[in-house]
Amino acid sequence: MNVPSSTNRLFKSTNPASWNEAADYASKEIHLLSACIDASISDVRDYFDSMVSKYFNVQGPTASGDWLVLGAKALVWGRKNNYYITQEELITTLVRKQRDYGHHNIAKFGRDGLLIRVHDKVARLENLIANGSDAQNEPIRDTVLDIAGYSVIGVMWDREQFLLELI
């Protein structure tokens, strides 16, 4: 499934007042989309690689629609493999981590930094699956949660909402 770059929102246009509200909208969009698609780990990888080709080190075009699809694909793969992540858990985790990290870690490198962070998570997931091994540090479920979380942040970044005040 490819969402055209002109597709910026699944819900009606919103003007969030805070970081929390923007994250909530984006995470709901990803969850809504995840109910409509299917995904394997190779679908997640292929979609992510197409995003890197289109957006890494490129200024201008918005990737919001693609971040939505990537996050949805990660959630679908997780659900198919018994790593179900609720929208409430996703938003709670995002807000908690944002309180710890603040705005500057993402703002320093923007979308390119997000793409690199997601690459690390997708590569970790692929490695664990290929080796059939249990994770030695964080559980696989946390990696799926991170991919979806970075996708929410990607949506917010491209909508110029990431720097809103966290309440």
Image (cartoon, grey):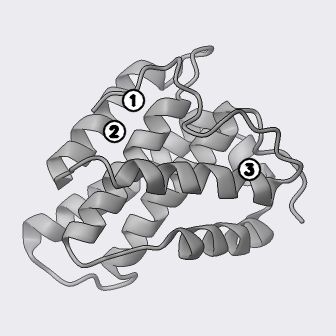
- Label located before the other in sequence (3 or 1): 3
Tell me if I can see residue 86 in this picture.
yes
CA neighbours of label 1 inside 10 A, class few (<14), some (14 to 19), many (20+): some
Tell me if I can see residue 109 in this picture.
no
Tell me the quarter of the image containing the N terminus. top left
CA neighbours of label 3 inside 10 A, class few (<14), some (14 to 19), many (20+): many
- Label located before the other in sequence (3 or 2): 3
Measured in 3D between alpha carbons, the distance from the residue under mark 3 to the one under mark 1, in whole angstroms, is: 24 Å
Q: Specify whether 102 is left or right of 159.
A: right
Q: Specify whether 83 is left or right of 131.
A: right
Query: Which residue matches tag 3?
Result: 22
Q: Secondary structure at mark 1?
A: helix
- Nearest the viewer among 100 and 44 is 44
Of badges 3 and 2, the one in the foreground is 3
The three-letter code of the residue at mark 2 reads Phe
Q: Secondary structure at mark 2?
A: helix
Query: Which residue matches tag 1?
Result: 52
Contact? badges 3 and 1 (CB < 8 Å): no
Query: Which residue matches tag 2?
Result: 48
Measured in 3D between alpha carbons, the distance from the residue under mark 3 to the one under mark 2, in whole angstroms, is: 23 Å
Q: Considering only vertical position in the picture, is 132 above or below 167?
A: below
Measured in 3D between alpha carbons, the distance from the residue under mark 2 to the one under mark 1, in whole angstroms, is: 6 Å
Residue at 66% x, 51% y is 25
Residue at 44% x, 33% y is 66
Residue at 86% x, 61% y is 166
The three-letter code of the residue at mark 1 reads Val
The three-letter code of the residue at mark 3 reads Ala
Contact? badges 2 and 1 (CB < 8 Å): yes
